[in-house]
Image: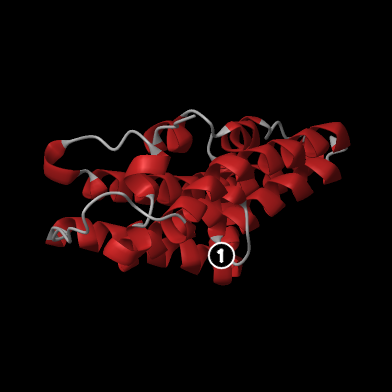
Amino acid sequence: MSAAPRRIVTGHDASGRSVVLSDAPTPRTLDIGTAAFLYYLAAYTLMTMGAFGVVIVLGENGTENTSIERDYAGIAWRHPLLAAAMALFMFSLTGIPPTAGFVGKFAILSAAVSAGHVPLAVVLVLASVISAYYYLKVVVSMYMWSSQREAIRSRVPAMAAIALLIAVVGVLGLGIFPGEWVAMARAAVTGAMRLP
């Protein structure tokens, strides 16, 4: 069974969509829940833009990569930096520490539990576990499967390399140093609540 990498980043992200849609804060958890939502939204933007960037860069001669088994097998040996970036984005989308995805999902789950939405938190955890299969399949393909394709090294355009570097630094920065980013999200929520 073949799965398109683009579909995995967009269509199979049940956990991401359910995390984003789960933030229905009550008055007592408005600040925490909304700040967690804003943080996860920023993290999710970096993760998906980075993953899409790698998918686009790996498209050879304008062709679309449509199969994980065929097109991503052995990428780690042909494009080690792109494979490392994609692995980071997949780990973050899965919610593995120390990435922004882990901190964002943890913040959303904490807000849901503190608001008394424990069944919703359980559903979010289950959705994350299910999505891990799809995300980690990409990583396994890149690092553990051999490719039938000829080992061609293509150049990464400078603007794409800069964009991917920004996404990598953002995903790691938001994951390793979340305190200031969460504080900024809370300040934004507090400021928005003061508006007439």
- Identify whether 107 is placed above or below 71: below
Q: Quadrant of residue 79?
A: bottom left
Q: How is the image coloured?
A: secondary structure
> Which residue lies at the image location 56% right of the left edge and 71% below the top edge?
176
- The reply to whether residue 79 is visible in this rendering is no
Q: Secondary structure at mark 1?
A: helix
One can see residue 178 in this view:
yes
The quarter in which the C terminus is drawn is top right
Residue furthest to the front in view is 148
Name the quadrant containing residue 10.
Answer: top left
Left or right of 9? Residue 161 is left
> Where does residue 157 sit, x and y in percent of width and height?
13, 58
Percent position of residue 32, x then y: 71, 49
Tell me: residue 54, above or below residue 34.
below
Q: Which picture quadrant has residue 74?
A: bottom left
Q: Residue at 17% of width from left, 58% of height from top?
A: 152
Tell me the residue that label 1 is attached to: 175
Q: Nearer the viewer, residue 31 or 141?
A: 141
Between 74 and 12, the one nearer to me in the picture: 74
Task: Look at the picture and state if 142 lies above or below 23.
Answer: below
Place of residue 27 in the rendered image (x, y in percent of width and height, measured from the top left): 77, 36
| Classed neighbour count for the residue bearing mark 1: other residues with Cα under 10 Å, few (<14), some (14–19), many (≥20) | many
Residue type at tag 1: Gly
Please state if 78 lies on the left or on the right of 192 as rendered: left
At x 61%, y 68%, the residue is: 179
